[in-house]
Amino acid sequence: MVNRGRVLILMSPSVLFLGLLFLLPLGLMALFSFRAGSFGAERDVFTLSHYQEFLGNTIMQRLLGRSVVLSLWVSLYTVLLAYPIAYYLSFRAGAMKFTLLSLIIVPAWVSYLLRVLSWKVILGSNGALASFLEWLGFTVDSPLLLYSADAVVITLVYVWVPFVALPIFTALERIDRSLLDAAADLGCSRWQAFTRVTLPLSLPGVLAGFLFVFIPTVGEYVTPALVGGPDGIMIGNIILDQFLRALNWPMGALLSLVMLVVVLLPLIFLGRFIRLADLAGA
Amino acid sequence: MKNFGRQVYTINFLVFLLVVGLGLAACGGETNETPVASGDNDSTVTEVDQTSDEPLVILEWSGYDAIGYPHFFAPFTSQYGEQLEELLSYSFFAEDAEAFAKMQSGFHADLVHPCNSWWQLYVDQGLVQPIDTSRLSNWAGIQADFAQMGQFNGQQYFIPWDWGYESMLVRTDLVPELPDSWADLWDEQYAGHVVLWDSGESNYAITALALGLDPWNTTPEDDERIKQKLLELKPNLLTYWTDYTEAYELPTGDDAWIVVNAWQDAYAYVDSEGFDVTYVQPEEGRLGWVCGFGIGADAVNVDLIYEYLDAAIAPESMAAFANEYWYGSANLDAIPLIDEYIVDFMELDQAESLTERTVLYQPLTEEQRQTRVDLWDEVKASP
């Protein structure tokens, strides 16, 4: 029989931690979106005017929409790229499995900024990609891919693939290999065995990976700022501007909240299908 | 077991609510935390007559601190040599908005170094105290126009220190034709090669100038025109620059032909690296800025502050940073000490005519400031 008291004591540090350092700031921020101003007397006045402003501002709404769509594409591409990697690791790598897994994770230890900036070098008009294309004989438009929404997508996919390969790998590892033997016994071809056994069983991991990328990417502002150019701007950049330059904290808080809600919806919906252990790579 | 799970859940949920509720109630209505004086409190200084043991807190742009650049404050650093680290502590900011937000949130700064379009806002919010210029021995050399700008309600609130231009930095070897007007930025021959500063205030000003308007005397209809005009500029853009190091680095590549708005130190740097660049003088005039020091409203070590300020506006200090950054010095006595080449190129000895030769940034009201940032955000957010 479980000692209830002990469980409560064990859980309370995390509850306190989450409560104080996560929920409380979130609550304060939500409160801020109702304030009239950021400082002084205005701060203590509460109003819905910012909400009205946002609801009437189609430009911001459409930017939010574009950011979400871009994140969806990034998540999709990341999953499509990470799946074969995870599959190879789980089913074909054999003894090399964990070595190769470590190799995939190692780039994640390099500074995030450095990885983004390296793409600036690759995608620029004098960069690796451009030089390669010129060597092949194509004439290259400056600045090639850099400073565009495409550059943002490419960079983000590159950054996230290691993080998505993990949950998918975990999900694939958990599949009982005897099921595949059974499928073969029952007359399935390799491809059929994959689509009817492996793929469905790995879907929770795939979904976990998908959400793992989607949620933070919607709020991205560093990558769009570095490689995005005028077309690659995302809602995160505007939120940053509202906080840092416009000093309009209520508006920034509002946009953050709206973004949070937009991101929570698929999470709640798909959350039923995900195993949290997959996210932790256990 | 099921029952127990629910019990644990309920109790924890209640703890959540309690914590969150307490937190919101406690922090909800107050202004932010107690002011912080950064830097260590370990003061073994006995030579200096301070009314407090804590170091001066100086809210400053990076690249202007007395510890890293002692020659910019020559009299002070030569007098207090080894004690500098104990007497001064710096908090750096990268944009005026950052400094302003910090001070409004209760950050205690003894000295702050904002630029003139913000000066009115600091005074309105009561963040700075009047300065007694009779305590500054070098005050007489300060250019009269600039000193005037720092006066509000008949009192001197800001000491002008550095001034400069904002203009287009152009790679002459890459552009087919040199731009000679702000309106040329919209020219299709530069499509994809113009880099804009991510600043609403600056872009508002140059667009207004391109449309033939006075940037500080606009109507809401003008705002709409400016916004449309800026949207038309977007196809010409390569990217925005936010960090000032980008303004140094972009002109050295091949993609950025025109960098807007660069200050003259970027020009000095790129030129010294051997690139063919020019710092354009558009027909409407370059933009001009003046920045200066204000004393925080709750500053305590006033004596030391005045010594620091006096050292800052001393001719040898002013000349030092002018030679380093090619910026102008507000103290006319410093002109003979600055490199002749710099003085000629930047017309530093013609500070009196700055208001005529350039479009000098004017103090903004809070409303104007908001309008410009919001307008720029809308331009950025539009596809």
Image: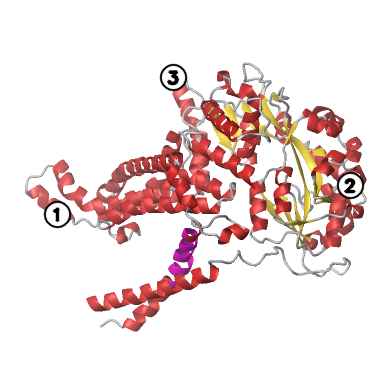
**Chain to which mark 3 belongs:** A
Is residue B139 shown left or right of residue A127?
A: right
**Which three-letter amino acid code belongs to the residue tagged 3?**
Phe
Residue shown at 39% from the left, 51% from the top: A215
Residue under label 2, please give it. B314
Question: Which residue extends farthest left?
Answer: A186
Is residue A63 shown left or right of residue B240?
A: left
Of circles 2 and 1, which is in front?
A: 2
Is residue B164 shown left or right of residue A204?
A: right
Q: Which residues are magenta?
A: A16-30
**Chain to which mark 1 belongs:** A
Q: Identify the mark nearer the N-term, 3 or 1.
A: 3
**Cα distance in 3D space between marks 2 and 3:** 60 Å
Q: Position of residue B217 (x, y in %)?
A: 68, 34
Asked if residue A20 lies in the magenta stretch, the reply is yes
Q: Position of residue B124 (x, y in %)?
A: 71, 53
Which of B212/A144 is in front? B212
